[in-house]
Amino acid sequence: MSNQRVSMHGMWSSRTVFVMATIGSAVGLGNIWKFPYITGQYGGGAFVVVYLLCIALIGIPIMMAEILLGRRGRASPISTMGRLAREEGSSPAWSLVGYSGVVAGFLILSFYSVIAGWALAYVFQTAGGALNGVTGESAARLFGDLTGSPVQLMIWHSVFMLMTTMVVARGVRQGLERAVSVLMPVLFVMLLVMVGYAVVEGDFARGFAFLFEADFSRVFQLCTGPAATPECRFTGEPVLVAMGHAFFTLSLGMGAIMAYGAYVPEHASITGATITIAVADTAVALLAGLAIFPIVFASGLEPAAGPGLIFQTLPIAFGNMPGGQWFGTMFFVLLVFAAWSSSISIAEPAVAWLVDTRNWRRAPAAWLVGALAWLLGIASVLSFNIWSGEEYQVFGKTFFELKDFLASNVMLPLGGLLIALFVGYGAARHMALEELAISRQRLFDAWWLVIRYVSPIGIAIVFLNSVGVF
Ligand code: TRP
């Protein structure tokens, strides 16, 4: 038994509830919206292989580290890092990991909510029959009309941020816990049905090959322009983005999982939970890819279409399949739920910190965090219309792209690196040994090796490579 601390924010009622809530956090827009569109942009198979490697060698070990720190510290990520650094005789500067996580959380929430807003808008479009019989062209027009309208985007962004804030204000336990454990399995089954549709109606062979046939010359290449006549340049960017996405999709590197880990019961197995979560998350992403790319190719669309990819392809399926109006509406409702159970975890570290160190009550803390992220989100809304032009871009990126890049590809891996270093070097080995309580010594030794060498060196190499050191 490592300690008898309990969290002041409440506890999960069982390990299963923790696993479900963490799957709720992990499975979201990252899997269904972001994974397909960046896989399309970065050329398919080779990108997927790098992403899977990052999940296995960096994501899973760091998720175990985050959960064990969270459970050991039993507080908000900032307080947990400070508390454990003190106990382990390390520098108080480790709590910077927590602060950087709070900042990353604001950046992510401020665009996550806007994209979730698109999904909300599509619930109503689909239910109202706007997708019936759409073609590739009309689907693209529909999407362009939505994203071209700052007013509409603002409305949906505001609605989603309100939904998020309301749940966070009530506390995670009473929040989405129960809804998620029913809805996520339904989403999974619906994805299977959509893959079935893609097999029958799409160009499944080509979609499958695009996802799983790796052309390794593409690992360090970024190609733009139409797929037939691409312009390619040599760059480490695809690897950086694949690694960043491994963090993003597993909700790692900013304390969200640490915050959830703080509410984990004492005797739950961290290793088993982590593997379940990572497998579920990866399965959803790959299914989403299998549902989308066959339609992309069958309809002659560009895989590299960007953030609108799923909103331009899935409507074609829903608009033309029998019962698609009903099925599509269900799908977007579930996508909203998946995004909802993720966004609450993005806000949780900041809220938990205001509660446990500033003595705020939970509700006002949640409203303050929600309001700030909402304000910052206005820049994401405008990135798709008024501010989409070059004169509003920084380093050739819109505000949306900039926030995503900075948070996902820089701050999350950096946070993950520091978490690995703290567990591997800043704290004593027996801390991890006690918390993980892995009965097979070999398994612990393997994890210990990975968390001390493989993950940190891997992250460092990708960073150095992407700033052009080699
Ligand atoms: N993992 C979620 C998704 O894939 C998003 C998310 C939730 C997240 N919490 C996070 C991303 C914390 C980074 C950090 O949609």
Image: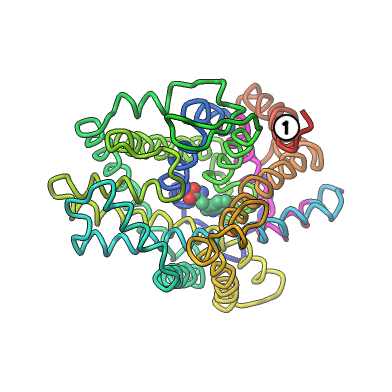
Horizontal side of residue 63 vs 27, given as left or right: right
Horizontal side of residue 205 vs 69, given as left or right: left
Horizontal side of residue 205 vs 225, given as left or right: left
Query: Which image quadrant for residue 329?
Result: bottom left
Q: In the rendered image of this protein, does residue 324 appear above or below residue 240?
A: below
Residue 215 locus on image (x, y percent): 50, 20
Residue 40 locus on image (x, y percent): 45, 37
Q: Nearer the viewer, residue 371 or 166?
A: 371
Q: In the rendered image of this protein, does residue 55 appear above or below residue 19?
A: above
Which residue appears at 43% of the width and 56% of the height?
A: 339
Quarter of the image with the C terminus in it: top right
Residue 358 locus on image (x, y percent): 71, 74
Amino acid type for the residue under numbered disc 1? Asn
Crowding near pointer 1: few (<14 within 10 Å), some, many (20+)? some
Which residue appears at 59% of the width and 43% of the height?
A: 247
Residue 174 forms part of the magenta stretch: no
Q: Nearer the viewer, residue 1 or 36?
A: 36
Residue 174 in view here: yes
Which residue appears at 27% of the width and 29% of the height?
A: 203
Residue wearing tag 1: 465
Q: In the rendered image of this protein, does residue 399 appear above or below residue 462?
A: below
Which residue appears at 49% of the width and 41% of the height?
A: 38
Residue 381 locus on image (x, y percent): 50, 66
Q: In the rendered image of this protein, does residue 106 appear above or below residue 166?
A: above
Residue 67 forms part of the magenta stretch: yes
Which residues are the magenta region?
A: 55-84
Residue 22 in view here: no
Local SS, label 1: helix
Q: In the displayed image of the protein, which residue is found farthest to the front?
A: 229
Q: Nearer the viewer, residue 269 or 246?
A: 246
Dominant secondary structure, magenta? helix
